[in-house]
Image (tube, rainbow, N blue to C red):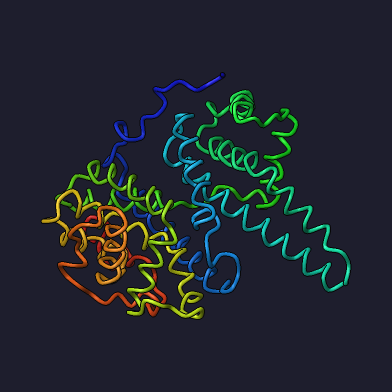
Protein backbone atom coordinates (compact mmCIF):
# COMPACT_ATOMS: atom_id res chain seq x y z
CA UNK A 1 0.00 0.00 0.00
CA UNK A 2 1.24 3.46 -0.91
CA UNK A 3 1.44 4.99 2.56
CA UNK A 4 2.95 8.22 3.88
CA UNK A 5 6.05 7.91 6.00
CA UNK A 6 5.54 7.90 9.77
CA UNK A 7 7.95 10.79 10.55
CA UNK A 8 5.39 13.26 9.19
CA UNK A 9 3.42 13.22 12.43
CA UNK A 10 5.18 15.90 14.44
CA UNK A 11 2.47 18.22 15.72
CA UNK A 12 3.24 17.61 19.39
CA UNK A 13 7.02 17.58 19.69
CA UNK A 14 7.70 20.22 17.02
CA UNK A 15 4.93 22.65 17.87
CA UNK A 16 6.46 25.97 18.92
CA UNK A 17 4.94 28.84 20.87
CA UNK A 18 6.32 32.35 21.21
CA UNK A 19 7.75 32.49 17.68
CA UNK A 20 5.16 34.89 16.27
CA UNK A 21 5.19 38.69 16.61
CA UNK A 22 2.60 40.11 19.01
CA UNK A 23 1.12 42.31 16.25
CA UNK A 24 0.40 39.22 14.16
CA UNK A 25 -1.17 37.46 17.14
CA UNK A 26 -3.39 40.48 17.87
CA UNK A 27 -4.61 40.64 14.27
CA UNK A 28 -5.24 36.90 14.07
CA UNK A 29 -7.04 36.79 17.41
CA UNK A 30 -9.28 39.68 16.44
CA UNK A 31 -10.06 37.97 13.12
CA UNK A 32 -10.94 34.70 14.88
CA UNK A 33 -13.13 36.58 17.36
CA UNK A 34 -15.06 38.31 14.58
CA UNK A 35 -15.38 35.06 12.66
CA UNK A 36 -16.67 33.31 15.77
CA UNK A 37 -19.18 36.05 16.55
CA UNK A 38 -20.58 35.80 13.04
CA UNK A 39 -20.89 32.01 13.31
CA UNK A 40 -22.70 32.31 16.65
CA UNK A 41 -25.14 34.89 15.26
CA UNK A 42 -25.83 32.77 12.18
CA UNK A 43 -26.44 29.71 14.34
CA UNK A 44 -28.94 31.66 16.44
CA UNK A 45 -30.88 32.38 13.25
CA UNK A 46 -31.04 28.74 12.25
CA UNK A 47 -33.06 27.41 15.20
CA UNK A 48 -34.99 24.29 14.29
CA UNK A 49 -32.65 23.36 11.42
CA UNK A 50 -30.31 20.39 11.25
CA UNK A 51 -27.59 22.37 13.03
CA UNK A 52 -29.42 21.87 16.32
CA UNK A 53 -27.73 18.48 16.62
CA UNK A 54 -24.39 17.85 15.00
CA UNK A 55 -24.69 14.83 12.71
CA UNK A 56 -21.07 13.75 13.08
CA UNK A 57 -20.87 14.62 16.77
CA UNK A 58 -24.16 13.01 17.80
CA UNK A 59 -24.71 9.44 18.89
CA UNK A 60 -25.35 8.22 15.33
CA UNK A 61 -22.26 9.92 13.94
CA UNK A 62 -19.83 9.36 16.80
CA UNK A 63 -18.35 6.41 14.92
CA UNK A 64 -17.78 8.63 11.89
CA UNK A 65 -15.77 11.10 13.95
CA UNK A 66 -13.73 8.28 15.45
CA UNK A 67 -13.21 6.87 11.95
CA UNK A 68 -11.84 10.22 10.78
CA UNK A 69 -9.47 10.51 13.75
CA UNK A 70 -8.16 6.95 13.35
CA UNK A 71 -7.76 7.34 9.59
CA UNK A 72 -5.90 10.62 10.02
CA UNK A 73 -3.60 8.95 12.52
CA UNK A 74 -2.96 6.01 10.18
CA UNK A 75 -2.10 8.43 7.37
CA UNK A 76 0.11 10.47 9.74
CA UNK A 77 -1.83 13.70 9.28
CA UNK A 78 -1.61 16.67 11.62
CA UNK A 79 -4.34 17.02 14.22
CA UNK A 80 -5.58 20.16 12.49
CA UNK A 81 -6.39 18.05 9.41
CA UNK A 82 -8.57 15.62 11.35
CA UNK A 83 -10.62 18.45 12.87
CA UNK A 84 -10.91 20.12 9.46
CA UNK A 85 -12.08 16.83 7.94
CA UNK A 86 -14.75 16.38 10.60
CA UNK A 87 -16.04 19.94 10.03
CA UNK A 88 -16.16 19.36 6.26
CA UNK A 89 -17.96 16.04 6.73
CA UNK A 90 -20.38 17.59 9.23
CA UNK A 91 -21.41 20.39 6.90
CA UNK A 92 -21.60 18.07 3.89
CA UNK A 93 -23.91 15.67 5.73
CA UNK A 94 -26.14 18.53 6.85
CA UNK A 95 -26.44 19.70 3.24
CA UNK A 96 -27.30 16.18 2.11
CA UNK A 97 -29.90 15.72 4.85
CA UNK A 98 -31.50 19.06 3.99
CA UNK A 99 -31.59 18.11 0.31
CA UNK A 100 -33.22 14.75 1.04
CA UNK A 101 -35.92 16.35 3.20
CA UNK A 102 -36.52 19.07 0.63
CA UNK A 103 -37.01 16.48 -2.11
CA UNK A 104 -39.34 14.44 0.11
CA UNK A 105 -41.43 17.52 0.92
CA UNK A 106 -41.74 18.49 -2.75
CA UNK A 107 -42.80 15.02 -3.83
CA UNK A 108 -45.24 14.50 -0.96
CA UNK A 109 -46.95 17.82 -1.72
CA UNK A 110 -47.26 16.69 -5.32
CA UNK A 111 -48.85 13.44 -4.16
CA UNK A 112 -46.31 11.40 -6.11
CA UNK A 113 -44.30 8.40 -5.05
CA UNK A 114 -41.32 9.66 -3.01
CA UNK A 115 -38.80 7.58 -4.94
CA UNK A 116 -36.41 10.44 -5.63
CA UNK A 117 -35.62 11.24 -2.01
CA UNK A 118 -35.42 7.55 -1.16
CA UNK A 119 -32.88 7.13 -3.95
CA UNK A 120 -30.88 10.07 -2.59
CA UNK A 121 -30.94 8.54 0.88
CA UNK A 122 -29.83 5.16 -0.45
CA UNK A 123 -27.04 6.76 -2.49
CA UNK A 124 -25.80 8.70 0.53
CA UNK A 125 -25.78 5.54 2.63
CA UNK A 126 -23.96 3.48 0.02
CA UNK A 127 -21.29 6.12 -0.62
CA UNK A 128 -20.83 7.38 2.93
CA UNK A 129 -17.37 5.82 3.45
CA UNK A 130 -16.22 7.18 0.09
CA UNK A 131 -17.47 10.66 0.99
CA UNK A 132 -15.86 10.47 4.43
CA UNK A 133 -12.49 9.54 2.94
CA UNK A 134 -12.88 12.35 0.39
CA UNK A 135 -13.38 14.82 3.24
CA UNK A 136 -10.12 13.64 4.83
CA UNK A 137 -8.31 13.90 1.52
CA UNK A 138 -9.64 17.41 0.89
CA UNK A 139 -8.59 18.47 4.37
CA UNK A 140 -5.10 17.10 3.74
CA UNK A 141 -4.87 19.19 0.58
CA UNK A 142 -5.63 22.31 2.58
CA UNK A 143 -2.81 21.49 4.98
CA UNK A 144 -0.15 19.98 2.73
CA UNK A 145 -0.03 21.53 -0.72
CA UNK A 146 3.06 19.58 -1.73
CA UNK A 147 2.60 16.37 0.25
CA UNK A 148 -1.02 15.29 0.25
CA UNK A 149 -2.75 11.93 0.52
CA UNK A 150 -2.55 10.50 -2.99
CA UNK A 151 -5.40 8.87 -4.87
CA UNK A 152 -3.47 5.60 -4.88
CA UNK A 153 -3.28 5.63 -1.08
CA UNK A 154 -7.00 6.31 -0.80
CA UNK A 155 -8.00 3.65 -3.33
CA UNK A 156 -5.79 1.04 -1.70
CA UNK A 157 -7.28 1.84 1.70
CA UNK A 158 -10.83 1.57 0.37
CA UNK A 159 -9.94 -1.72 -1.27
CA UNK A 160 -8.86 -3.17 2.09
CA UNK A 161 -12.37 -2.37 3.36
CA UNK A 162 -13.98 -4.08 0.40
CA UNK A 163 -14.87 -0.92 -1.54
CA UNK A 164 -13.71 -1.01 -5.16
CA UNK A 165 -13.58 2.43 -6.74
CA UNK A 166 -11.78 4.02 -9.66
CA UNK A 167 -9.77 7.24 -9.68
CA UNK A 168 -12.60 8.85 -11.65
CA UNK A 169 -15.10 7.94 -8.92
CA UNK A 170 -12.73 9.31 -6.28
CA UNK A 171 -12.44 12.63 -8.14
CA UNK A 172 -16.22 12.75 -8.61
CA UNK A 173 -16.65 12.19 -4.86
CA UNK A 174 -14.35 15.12 -4.04
CA UNK A 175 -16.19 17.29 -6.54
CA UNK A 176 -19.54 16.32 -5.03
CA UNK A 177 -18.35 17.44 -1.58
CA UNK A 178 -16.92 20.68 -2.99
CA UNK A 179 -20.08 21.53 -4.92
CA UNK A 180 -22.34 20.77 -1.95
CA UNK A 181 -20.34 23.25 0.16
CA UNK A 182 -20.01 25.78 -2.65
CA UNK A 183 -16.25 25.12 -2.58
CA UNK A 184 -16.08 26.68 0.92
CA UNK A 185 -14.06 24.01 2.74
CA UNK A 186 -11.43 26.09 4.52
CA UNK A 187 -13.57 26.00 7.64
CA UNK A 188 -12.64 27.25 11.11
CA UNK A 189 -11.94 24.64 13.76
CA UNK A 190 -11.75 24.91 17.56
CA UNK A 191 -8.06 23.99 17.41
CA UNK A 192 -7.20 27.34 15.81
CA UNK A 193 -8.84 29.13 18.75
CA UNK A 194 -7.14 26.90 21.31
CA UNK A 195 -3.67 27.41 19.85
CA UNK A 196 -4.09 31.15 19.44
CA UNK A 197 -5.26 31.57 23.04
CA UNK A 198 -2.31 29.47 24.21
CA UNK A 199 -0.02 31.87 22.34
CA UNK A 200 -1.55 34.79 24.22
CA UNK A 201 -1.33 32.98 27.55
CA UNK A 202 2.37 32.41 26.93
CA UNK A 203 2.97 36.12 26.34
CA UNK A 204 0.88 37.02 29.38
CA UNK A 205 3.03 34.99 31.73
CA UNK A 206 0.81 31.97 32.34
CA UNK A 207 2.33 29.73 35.02
CA UNK A 208 1.52 26.54 33.08
CA UNK A 209 3.74 26.17 29.95
CA UNK A 210 1.82 26.46 26.68
CA UNK A 211 3.41 23.34 25.22
CA UNK A 212 2.35 21.36 28.28
CA UNK A 213 -1.22 22.62 27.99
CA UNK A 214 -1.26 22.01 24.24
CA UNK A 215 -0.78 18.26 24.54
CA UNK A 216 -3.64 17.93 27.04
CA UNK A 217 -5.86 20.26 25.01
CA UNK A 218 -5.58 17.97 21.98
CA UNK A 219 -6.73 14.98 24.03
CA UNK A 220 -9.69 16.87 25.51
CA UNK A 221 -10.66 18.35 22.15
CA UNK A 222 -10.79 14.85 20.68
CA UNK A 223 -13.01 13.83 23.56
CA UNK A 224 -15.42 16.75 23.06
CA UNK A 225 -15.70 15.92 19.36
CA UNK A 226 -16.48 12.28 20.12
CA UNK A 227 -18.79 13.07 23.07
CA UNK A 228 -20.20 16.29 21.66
CA UNK A 229 -23.84 15.73 22.56
CA UNK A 230 -23.29 14.39 26.12
CA UNK A 231 -20.90 17.25 26.96
CA UNK A 232 -23.24 19.94 25.67
CA UNK A 233 -26.27 18.28 27.22
CA UNK A 234 -24.52 18.48 30.59
CA UNK A 235 -23.74 22.13 29.90
CA UNK A 236 -27.34 22.89 28.94
CA UNK A 237 -28.77 21.21 32.04
CA UNK A 238 -26.34 23.10 34.25
CA UNK A 239 -27.08 26.43 32.59
CA UNK A 240 -30.84 26.19 33.10
CA UNK A 241 -30.52 24.37 36.43
CA UNK A 242 -32.96 21.75 35.18
CA UNK A 243 -32.34 18.12 34.22
CA UNK A 244 -35.07 18.14 31.55
CA UNK A 245 -34.62 21.06 29.12
CA UNK A 246 -37.56 22.03 26.94
CA UNK A 247 -37.38 22.02 23.14
CA UNK A 248 -37.29 25.81 23.08
CA UNK A 249 -34.41 25.89 25.55
CA UNK A 250 -32.55 23.38 23.41
CA UNK A 251 -33.09 25.49 20.30
CA UNK A 252 -31.83 28.62 22.04
CA UNK A 253 -28.73 26.65 23.02
CA UNK A 254 -27.76 26.07 19.37
CA UNK A 255 -25.57 29.17 19.25
CA UNK A 256 -23.59 27.95 22.28
CA UNK A 257 -22.72 24.77 20.37
CA UNK A 258 -21.27 26.88 17.57
CA UNK A 259 -19.20 29.11 19.87
CA UNK A 260 -15.65 27.93 19.21
CA UNK A 261 -14.16 30.64 21.43
CA UNK A 262 -16.20 29.36 24.37
CA UNK A 263 -15.19 25.79 23.57
CA UNK A 264 -11.52 26.82 23.39
CA UNK A 265 -11.50 28.51 26.78
CA UNK A 266 -13.30 25.52 28.30
CA UNK A 267 -10.75 23.14 26.82
CA UNK A 268 -7.79 25.22 28.06
CA UNK A 269 -9.27 25.70 31.53
CA UNK A 270 -9.91 21.95 31.86
CA UNK A 271 -6.37 21.22 30.67
CA UNK A 272 -4.93 23.68 33.20
CA UNK A 273 -6.86 21.98 36.01
CA UNK A 274 -5.48 18.59 34.98
CA UNK A 275 -1.91 19.84 34.60
CA UNK A 276 -1.75 22.07 37.69
CA UNK A 277 -4.97 22.75 39.56
CA UNK A 278 -3.21 25.29 41.78
CA UNK A 279 -2.75 27.54 38.73
CA UNK A 280 -6.32 27.00 37.49
CA UNK A 281 -7.64 30.31 38.86
CA UNK A 282 -4.81 32.27 37.24
CA UNK A 283 -5.45 30.65 33.85
CA UNK A 284 -9.16 31.33 34.22
CA UNK A 285 -8.45 35.00 34.90
CA UNK A 286 -6.26 35.30 31.85
CA UNK A 287 -8.88 33.64 29.63
CA UNK A 288 -11.61 35.91 30.95
CA UNK A 289 -9.51 39.02 30.30
CA UNK A 290 -8.56 37.93 26.79
CA UNK A 291 -11.99 36.82 25.55
CA UNK A 292 -14.48 38.73 27.69
CA UNK A 293 -16.26 35.45 28.50
CA UNK A 294 -17.58 35.32 32.07
CA UNK A 295 -15.60 33.30 34.60
CA UNK A 296 -18.78 31.41 35.47
CA UNK A 297 -19.22 30.25 31.87
CA UNK A 298 -15.58 29.16 31.57
CA UNK A 299 -15.76 27.28 34.87
CA UNK A 300 -19.00 25.53 33.97
CA UNK A 301 -17.72 24.44 30.57
CA UNK A 302 -14.47 23.12 32.01
CA UNK A 303 -16.52 21.28 34.63
CA UNK A 304 -18.63 19.62 31.91
CA UNK A 305 -15.50 18.56 30.01
CA UNK A 306 -13.76 17.22 33.11
CA UNK A 307 -16.89 15.34 34.19
CA UNK A 308 -16.93 13.43 30.90
CA UNK A 309 -13.17 12.86 30.89
CA UNK A 310 -11.57 12.31 34.30
CA UNK A 311 -14.82 12.33 36.27
CA UNK A 312 -12.94 13.06 39.48
CA UNK A 313 -12.77 16.11 41.76
CA UNK A 314 -13.37 19.00 39.39
CA UNK A 315 -13.40 22.80 39.66
CA UNK A 316 -17.17 22.78 39.49
CA UNK A 317 -17.31 20.77 42.70
CA UNK A 318 -14.79 22.96 44.44
CA UNK A 319 -16.31 26.24 43.30
CA UNK A 320 -19.95 25.89 42.18
CA UNK A 321 -21.08 28.71 39.92
CA UNK A 322 -24.25 29.40 37.91
CA UNK A 323 -23.17 29.88 34.28
CA UNK A 324 -26.34 31.34 32.67
CA UNK A 325 -24.89 30.38 29.30
CA UNK A 326 -28.19 30.49 27.43
CA UNK A 327 -28.90 34.01 28.58
CA UNK A 328 -25.36 35.21 27.84
CA UNK A 329 -25.79 38.51 25.98
CA UNK A 330 -24.21 39.13 22.57
CA UNK A 331 -20.62 40.13 22.97
CA UNK A 332 -17.46 40.85 21.11
CA UNK A 333 -15.41 37.77 21.85
CA UNK A 334 -12.49 39.77 23.10
CA UNK A 335 -11.90 43.34 24.20
CA UNK A 336 -10.33 45.95 21.97
CA UNK A 337 -6.55 45.77 22.04
CA UNK A 338 -6.54 49.56 22.10
CA UNK A 339 -8.46 49.48 25.37
CA UNK A 340 -6.32 46.67 26.72
CA UNK A 341 -3.09 48.41 25.85
CA UNK A 342 -1.77 45.56 23.71
CA UNK A 343 -1.93 41.82 23.86
CA UNK A 344 0.74 41.36 26.52
CA UNK A 345 -1.23 43.54 28.91
CA UNK A 346 -4.60 41.81 28.37
- Dividing the picture into quarters, in which one does residue 324 lie? bottom left
Q: What is the tally of numbered marks visible in this picture? A: 0
Asked if 145 appears above or below 21 in the picture, the reply is above
Q: Residue furthest left?
A: 278
Residue at horizontal 77%, vertical 69%?
105
Residue at horizontal 16%, vertical 62%?
281
- Dividing the picture into quarters, in which one does residue 335 lie? bottom left
Front one among 47 and 202: 47
Residue at horizontal 11%, vertical 56%?
278
Which percent across, then down, holds residue 178? Answer: 67, 46
- Dividing the picture into quarters, in which one does residue 238 lie? bottom left
Residue at horizontal 58%, vertical 27%?
157
Which percent across, then down, holds residue 289? Answer: 25, 65
Q: The C terminus is located in which quarter?
A: bottom left
Asked if 319 appears above or below 22 in the picture, the reply is below
Which percent across, then down, holds residue 130? Answer: 65, 38
Query: On the rendered structure, is 236 left or right of 142?
Result: left
Front one among 316 and 43: 316
Asked if 145 appears above or below 4 in the picture, the reply is below
Which percent across, then down, holds residue 58? Answer: 50, 58
Q: The N terminus is located in which quarter?
A: top right
Amino acid sequence: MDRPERPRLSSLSDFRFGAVATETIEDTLLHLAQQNEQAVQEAAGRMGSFRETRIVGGDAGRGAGQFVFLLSEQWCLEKSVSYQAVEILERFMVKQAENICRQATIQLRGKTEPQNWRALKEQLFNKFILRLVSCVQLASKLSFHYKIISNVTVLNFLRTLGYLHTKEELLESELDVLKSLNFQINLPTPLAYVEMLLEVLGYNGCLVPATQLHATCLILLDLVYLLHEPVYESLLRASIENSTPSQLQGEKFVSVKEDFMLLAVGIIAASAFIQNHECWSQVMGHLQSITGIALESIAEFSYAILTHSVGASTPGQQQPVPPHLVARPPRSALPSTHEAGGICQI
